[in-house]
Amino acid sequence: MDKNQITGLVLMLALMTIYFQFFADEIPQEPVEQAATETTVASPAAQENPGMPSAAIVNDSLTTAIHQDRYGIFAPYASGEAKEINIENESVKITLSSRGGVVKRVELKDYLTYDKEPLVLIDRNSSQSDLVLISNYKPVNVSELYYTPDYSRLEVSGTDSLSLSFKIAIDGGRYIEHKYKLGGTGFQLRYEINLIGMDGIIDNQDAQLTWVDHMKNVEHTLKESRAKTTINYQPTGGDFDDLGVGEGTESETIEQGLKWFAFKQRFFASALIADNQMSKATLSTYVDTSDSSTVKSGTAVLSLPIGDLKTGKGKFQYYFGPNDYTVQKKVVDGFEQNVDLGWFIFRLVNKFLIIPIFNLLENFISNYGVIIIILVFVIRLILAPLTYKSHMSMAKMKVLKPEMDAIKEKHEGDMQKSQKETMELYSKAGINPLSGCIPVLLQFPFLLAMFNFFPNSIELRQQAFLWAKDLSTYDNVLNLPFEIPFYGDHVSLFTLLMTASTILYTWSNSQMNSQMQGPMKTMQYMMPIMFLFFLNSFSAGLTFYYFVSNIVSFGQMALFRKFVDEDKILKVMEENRKKNANKKKSKFQLKLEEAMKAGEDQRKKGKKKK
C-alpha cells in the first residue's frame, strides 16, 4: 500500500465516521433480532445498520492506518500497555518501562535532597530519551513502541548482578532488543542496543538517540548549583571539555566522535559512556530562570554507528551517581574530571595529596569538622620548612632594618641611589631579597587547591559541624532583611572569623617584614576585606579550613620566634660582609640595577615634561 492509497483510505474512513456520528438517524431502520448467545453489544449505529461498520471499528481502522504509515513493519507494536519494572542494588533504584525499553526513574539510595526527601536524579517528568532508526528511508521512533520484557530477578547485592531485556521480535531471528545489566553495588547500568537480523528492515544509516534532561534542583542554593551545572564530555581521542556554566544557551557539535558525556550538576551526574564511540553529537544547555525546580536543561543528540548496533557492538553504560572522585575514576578514563579540582597545578595537589589524606582520615573519623582540623595540621606540617625559611628571611630583614632606614634617610628623594645601596647591603650580608617571597609563592598552590576541593567535595554535603548545618554550603548565623551588594543577605560566621584572623596574622607578619612600607603596608589589609565579601556565600568547610589554618600559623610563628636568635643572625651577616667585601656583582644584580636606572630615568623625563 503506497502513500496515496493510505491517504485515500484515511480520508474515506474519516468521512464515514463523520457520517455515522451526525446522519445515521435519518437512515430507514429495520428491526434486527439479537442472537441470544452474543456477548458483545454493538453500537446503536451498527445495530440499526448491520451493513455498515461501527464508529469504534472505523476509529480502530483509522488508528491502524496511521500506525502503519508512521511505524511501517513495527505498526503492530505501536499500541499496548506500558509495564514499569523496578530494579535495585545497594546504591540505586531504577525504574524501566516496556514502552520504549527506557530508563524512567533513578533514585540514589544513600542520598537525600536538601529538604530530606529521597533524591530522585531523573524521573518521567524531567527526563526523556528517544531512539530513532531509519526503516525503508523513513525515521521510526522505536522508543514509542511496546516491548516484551524478560527478567528473572529484580534485586541484587554484593558481587551478584541481574539482567533484563526488552524485545520486539518480528520473528525468531529478527528483533530489536534493549538489554540492561545491573551489578550488586555501584551506580553504573550496562546497556546494549541490539538490532539482530534487521538488514533489509533497518537501513544502514546511523541511529539517532536524543536525551533531554531537565536537571532537578536537589540542593539548598539554586544560584550556586546553576553556576556549577553544565554538560561535560570527552571526544574520541580528544581532551575533556564542557559547555561552560553561563545562564544563556550553550551549544557544541562534536564531529570527530564522542566517548562519553555527562549532565553534570554540582554533586551528581547522569551520563552515557560508549564502549566504542558515538559517531557524532550535538550538546546544548539552557536555563529557565523562572523555574526554581530545575537547575538547568540539557539536550544531547547522538549519532550511534548502525554497524555496531547490528553486530552486537552497540554497548554502553549509564552512570547515575555522585561526583565522587574515588568512585568516578573507576568508571572510564577521564570521567573523574566531572569533579572540578581546579587548574593543572591545583588539580595535581588535590589529586595526589589532599584527596588521599582526606580519604585516609575518613576511615577513622566520622566528624568532618575534626577531619578538616587534622587536615590543616598535616598540610601546615608539610609546608613547615617553607614557612620557616620565609620567617627566617623576614628576621634577617628585621635585623638590617636600622641600616636600611639609614640608607633611605641618606638618599632621601633619590630612589635609584637608595635602591642601589640597599641591594649592595643585601649582597654583602648574604641575603637574597627573593628568599622570603619564593617560599610564600610555593605555598599558594596548596592554599588555592582548597578553594576547589571543599566547595566540590560531596563528602561534606549535608554534614553538620558546630553551628554549620551543611559544610558544603555557607553557614548562616543571621538572615539580613536586605541584600548587601557583593555580600548577600546573610552573615557567615566562619567567614567573619577567617577575615578577623587573617587581618591579625597580616598585622603580626608586618611587624617582622621591614620591606613592607608605605601604601603597600596598607594594601595588604585589603585582601582579607575582599575575601569577607567574596567568600560569604562559599562552602563553610573552606572558610573553616582557612580560619583554622590562620590559628595554626600563629602557633607556628610563635614557635619559630623562640628558635630565632637575632644576635646570631647579625653575627653571621657581619661575617658575610667580610667575606663579600671585594665580591663582584652578580649578573642578576647588574641587570636589576640597570632596570632600576632605566625606571628612574623614565620617571625624571616624565617630571620634565610636566
Image (cartoon, rainbow, N blue to C red):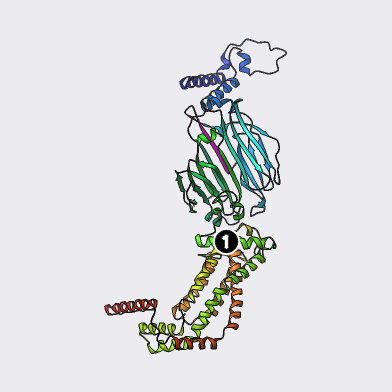
Q: Quadrant of residue 564?
A: bottom right
Callout 1 secondary element? helix
Nearest the eye: 252 or 169: 169
Residue furthest to the left in view is: 609
Q: Please say if 218 is above or below 574.
A: above
Nearest the eye: 548 or 375: 375
| Count of labels in the image | 1
Residue 224: x %, y % from top left: 55, 57
Q: Please say if 524 is above or below 541.
A: below
The chief SS type of the magenta part is strand
Q: Please say if 236 is above or below 70.
A: below
Residue at horizontal 45%, vertical 88%? 578
**Any magenta on residue 329?**
no
**Any magenta on residue 137?**
yes
Q: Is residue 177 visible?
A: yes
Residue at horizontal 51%, vertical 29%? 202
Give the quadrant of the C terminus: bottom left
Q: Please say if 302 is above or below 231.
A: above
Residue at horizontal 56%, vertical 25%? 63
Q: Is residue 288 visible?
A: no
Residue 179: x %, y % from top left: 61, 36
Q: Which residues are magenta?
A: 122-139
10 Å neighbourhood of mark 1: few (<14), some, or many (≥20)?
Answer: few
Residue 91: x %, y % from top left: 67, 48
In the image, is 312 to the left or to the right of 37? left
Residue furthest to the right in view is: 36
Residue 236: x %, y % from top left: 49, 46
Q: Residue tagged by mark 1?
A: 352
Q: What amino acid is labelled 1 in the image?
A: Phe
Residue at horizontal 68%, vertical 63%? 367
